[in-house]
Every structure is written in C-alpha cells, then in structure tokens.
C-alpha cells in the first residue's frame, strides 16, 4: 500500500513511540487547527479516530481546538460521532452565499451549519461525554478590532500585522486569548500564552456562542458579543493568535498529543502564514505526534491541493462545481484513514516516524 501520511514527532513523543508503539490510551490530548475548508481532507480520519479508535475509552481525553478544529471536535463529541460528522460535513460542503455576502450573512450561515450537527441536544451531549473534554480557543478583540465596521477593522488588522512582524508577543495589544473549557477535567496546559484571560467554563447556555466565536473570522464574519459567563467584549476566531496551536500542552512526557493536521507545517498564528521563519517552539512540540497528508498525496488531488477558502473565488457562480470538488477531497481522505490504520496494525509507524524539522 502506497503511503499517504507523514508522521512527525517531537523529541519525547518520538522516543516514546519508538520504544512502545502507539495505543489509544497513550494519547492524552488531541489538537485541531484552524483552517476553514482545509478540514475536509481530515473528515474520514476523524470518523476513524472518534468512531472506532477511541471508542470504549474510560480515561479523560482532552480535545483542544481553534476555529474549525473546535467545530470538528464538537461534532466528534456527540453521542454518535460519525453521524454528527456526516451532518457537519454535508452542511459545510453545501454552504452558499450571495455574490458579496455581508459578515452578518456569513455568520447566519455558520449558525445554520452549527445547528445542522448540534441540533438542540448537542451541547448537552458534548458536555456530558463520558471521556472527551472539549476546549476551544477564541480571542477577545481589543480597541479598533472590537468593532465590526470595515474601517476600524482594517486599521486594527494593519496594526496587528505590523506588530506581528516584530514579535508575536505584541499581538496582546490587539487580542487576548480566551479559552472556553470543559471544567470536568482541568486542562493540562501550563499557560495559554501572552495576554491570556482566565479560562471560561463551557455550559449549555454559552456553548453555541463560544463555538461560533471560535470560528468568526475577522472581516468575514461578525464578532460575537455577550457570551454568558465570559468577560464582556467582542470575541472572534481563535486562529488569529492560535492558528496551529503552538502552545505548551503541559504533558511533560506523560502522554502523547495526537495532532491530525492538513499540512506538515505548524504555523503559530493566522498572521504568520507568509512568514516562513516563524516556527513553533520545539518545547511545545515535544509530546506531539503530527499526522498529515504527504505532499505527493495532495499533488494528486483534484486541482492539486486540498480544499480552502480560495475555492469560493475559483468556483464563483458555480456552487455546484465547488460542492462536487469538496466532496472529492473529502472522499480522498478515506485513504488517509486507511493508511493510519495500516501503520498501526503493521507496526511500521515506528519506521515512518520523523522528527520535526
């Protein structure tokens, strides 16, 4: 079977897996990145992990996501994770908009997608899951970025982009990290970075608002305000600061952070996408096992890439064409799930492990 996945591991994870292999119980944390439509290539792997591999688990499993990563994990934490992921994927693929959608329109459509896989009982199911503990990142916007008007947002983003070029630490001038957490299991993270706020407990009352905020892209969607239990403010996409979760997971060698990802690169923040020199901290990645499609696999996909937000422009006026393309990308993800299963069953995961560069 031709290999479809690359397995990259931090220093401690690499040694742990080489010594003892990988079992579901070794995984203490699962991480999920922001990235919008890019998640579709991971949908089949999510179904395998949460529909089979982690089934029957007793020990708490911490799920930490930003933006679409938190949406994936919310669906995967319902009573029937495969059905919820099916509903999520179908609603996500079939989203369609007017020619120049307003932020309010995109937010309404996002709420419709959320309702399609959560319904009325989803929040209660997620928050009562026997072992999975959902944690999601948002940001609380500061100063000009707390407004939804085009001009203040543009000026605020220009300031954030310039400051980020100097140092990621300067993002605290524009955003505060905000973590919404399942309080049944304390999160293992040592901290959640510069400018962080105290974690806010997820509840049935604030669940949907927090989840919507986690994926509310600045300028594209409206900010989310008045989240029950959270400090006042305008909450937006957690990927603005924690795009690919370069955070101190805090396991200190006592377990693995499994990171199903759509690329073999960890980009710390949304504003770092074009900054090739901005890399994650090796210490933060020490316990991480990153599982991602190989570049050769991606090159063989339709259009030679995974699905992304540019598809809305590429298929402008042809929603049906975009729907079909996204379905093909999702279907191709089944090969990733099969390769993951084969790597574990055959034991060749050890020989395929590579360190983070």
Image: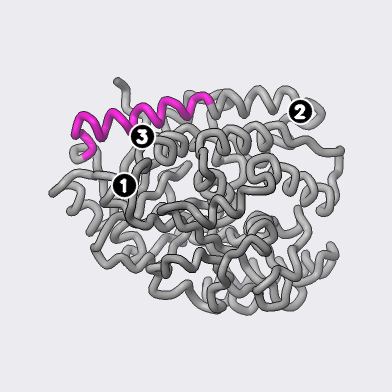
User: Is 147 one of the magenta-colored residues?
Assistant: no
Provide residue 7's location: percent of width, then percent of height.
31, 42
Whether residue 354 is visible here, answered yes or no, is yes
Asked if the magenta segment contains residue 342, the reply would be: yes
Query: Disc number at residue 260?
Result: none
Q: Tell me the distance, in whole angstroms, between the alpha carbons under discs 2 and 3.
A: 30 Å
Report the front residue among 292 and 126: 126
Query: What are the residue bounds of the magenta stretch?
Result: 331-349
Q: Which residue lies furthest to the top in this view?
A: 1
Q: Which of marks 2 and 3 is nearer the N terminus?
A: 3
**Residue 27, percent across and down?**
31, 52
Tell which of 314 and 87 is nearer to you. Answer: 87
Q: Is mark 3 on a helix, strand or loop?
A: strand
Query: Is residue 344 depicted above or below 54 in this figure?
Result: above
Say which mark, if any, is on residue 8. 1
Residue at (44% x, 62% y) in the render = 246
Residue matched to label 3 = 5
Circles 2 and 1: CB atoms closer than 8 Å: no
**Residue 179 location (% of width, % of height):** 55, 68
Tag 1 secondary structure: strand
Q: Residue at x 22, y 51 (%)?
A: 14
Instruction: Tell me the quarter of the picture where residue 171 sits.
Output: bottom right
Label 2 Cα neighbours within 10 Å, binned few <14 / some 14-19 / many ≥20: some
Which residue shows up at 55% across the image and 54% down it? 273
Magenta region, main secondary structure: helix
21 horizontally vs 308: left or right: left
Q: In which quarter of the image is the N terminus?
A: top left
Q: Which residue lies furthest to the left in this view?
A: 19
Dot 2 corresponds to which residue?
Answer: 319
Task: Check disc 2 and report its element: helix, strand or loop.
Answer: helix
């Amino acid at each position: 079977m031709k290999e479809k996945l690359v397995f990259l591991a931090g220093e401690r994870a690499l040694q742990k897996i080489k010594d003892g292999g990988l079992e579901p119980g070794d995984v203490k944390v699962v991480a999920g990145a922001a990235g919008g439509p890019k998640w579709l290539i991971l949908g089949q792997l999510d179904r395998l992990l949460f529909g089979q591999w982690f089934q029957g688990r007793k020990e708490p499993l911490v799920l930490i996501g930003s933006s679409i990563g938190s949406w994936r994990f919310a669906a995967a934490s319902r009573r029937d994770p495969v059905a919820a992921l099916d509903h999520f994927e179908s609603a996500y693929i079939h989203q369609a908009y007017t020619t120049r959608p307003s932020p309010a329109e995109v937010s309404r459509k996002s709420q419709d997608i959320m309702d399609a896989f959560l319904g009325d009982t989803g929040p209660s199911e997620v928050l009562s899951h026997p072992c999975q503990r959902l944690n999601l990142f948002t940001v609380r916007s500061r100063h000009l970025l707390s407004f939804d008007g085009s001009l203040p947002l543009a000026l605020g983003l220009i300031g954030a982009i310039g400051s980020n070029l100097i140092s990621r630490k300067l993002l605290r001038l524009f955003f505060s990290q905000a973590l919404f957490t399942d309080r049944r299991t304390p999160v293992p993270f040592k901290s959640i970075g510069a400018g962080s706020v105290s974690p806010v407990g997820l509840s049935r009352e604030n669940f949907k608002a927090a989840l919507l905020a986690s994926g509310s892209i600045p300028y594209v969607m409206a900010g989310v305000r008045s989240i029950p239990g959270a400090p006042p403010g305008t909450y937006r996409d957690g990927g603005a600061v924690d795009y690919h979760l370069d955070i101190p997971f805090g396991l200190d060698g006592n377990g693995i952070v499994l990171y199903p990802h759509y690329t073999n690169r960890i980009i710390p923040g949304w504003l770092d996408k074009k900054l090739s020199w901005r890399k994650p901290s090796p210490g933060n990645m020490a316990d991480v096992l990153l599982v991602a499609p190989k570049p050769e696999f991606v090159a063989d996909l339709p259009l030679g890439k995974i699905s992304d937000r540019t598809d809305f422009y590429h298929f402008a006026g042809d929603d049906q064409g975009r729907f079909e393309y996204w379905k093909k990308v999702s279907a191709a993800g089944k090969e990733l799930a099969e390769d993951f299963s084969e790597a574990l069953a055959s034991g060749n995961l050890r020989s395929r492990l590579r360190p983070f560069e």
